Image: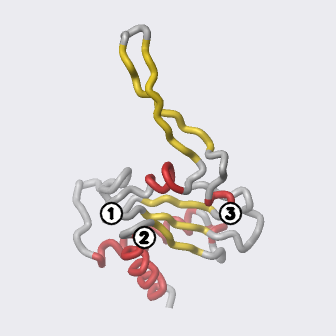
Amino acid sequence: MYKTENWNETDTPITVWLGGGPGESGQFGNFLANGPLRISEELVFNNLTNSSDVLFNVKNYPGGSWANNATMIYVDQPWMTGFSYSSDNSTVEFWGDCMRYFGNFMDNLYDMYPEFSGRPLIFTGESYAAKYFSIFAYYLETLNE
């Protein structure tokens, strides 16, 4: 998660990003698409071992990012995707489970960051994420009725 520097504006949105897939980590968007950091690799020669090594660099993206205008939250879901995990190594098999778990995530997010309340909420992502978000938005809307 990256809190925007424009936080003082009350209409600054909270943006939740999901990867495509199904099952692609949200971190692809974080590090390769629209996040404030960029990972690059460089092949360097190691004189001690007389071999080549790969060096990974993490730098601020000079062109800016979506985090300039919104608080960005990159989510790995369903669980067992990317850095997400399950205590019993189970996987999610049904849409209903995905909806409930994502609803729990959103509830916990707002409990942990009450300052997010009342701000616009944007769901976005790539590819298959559109299928998830349409169901998640519907589910969250029915919970709020």
The residue sitting at the top extreme is 48
Q: Which residue is mark 3?
A: 69
Give the spatial CA distance, label 3 vs label 2: 26 Å
Q: Is residue 138 above or below residue 131?
A: below
Name which of mark 1 and mark 2 comes first in the sequence.
1
Q: Amino acid at mark 2?
A: Asn
Q: Which residue is mark 2?
A: 104
Q: Secondary structure at mark 3?
A: loop
> Which residue, given by chain and number where applicable, does mark 1 sit on?
21
Kindly identify the residue that appears in the image at 37 percent across and 10 percent down. Answer: 50
Amino acid type at circle 3 is: Asn
Q: Nearer the viewer, mark 3 or mark 2?
A: 3
Where residue 51 appears, as percent x and y from the top left, is 36, 15
Judge from the rendering whether residue 97 lies leftward or rightward of residue 127; answer left or right.
left
Horizontal relation, residue 110 to residue 115: left or right: left
Which quadrant: the N terminus?
bottom right
Residue placed at 60% from the left, 55% from the top? 2
Label 1 secondary element: loop
The residue positioned 40% from the left and 58% from the top of the image is: 76
Q: Are marks 1 and 3 in contact (CB under 8 Å)?
A: no
Left or right placement of residue 124 versus residue 52 in this view: right
Horizontally, is 138 left or right of 94 in the view?
Answer: right
Whether label 3 touches label 2, CB < 8 Å: no
Q: Residues within 10 Å of mark 2 (few under 14, many from 20)?
A: few
Residue farthest to the bottom, as pictured = 145
Hey, which quadrant is residue 138 in on the image?
Answer: bottom left
Q: Residue 130, position in %: x, y? A: 41, 74
Residue at x 22%, y 59% (from the top left corner): 90
Q: Residues within 10 Å of mark 1 (few under 14, many from 20)?
A: few
Residue 59 picture location, percent across and down:
59, 39
- How far apart, in angstroms, are the residues tagged by discs 1 and 3? 26 Å
Indicate which disc, 1 or 3, sits on the residue closer to the N terminus. 1
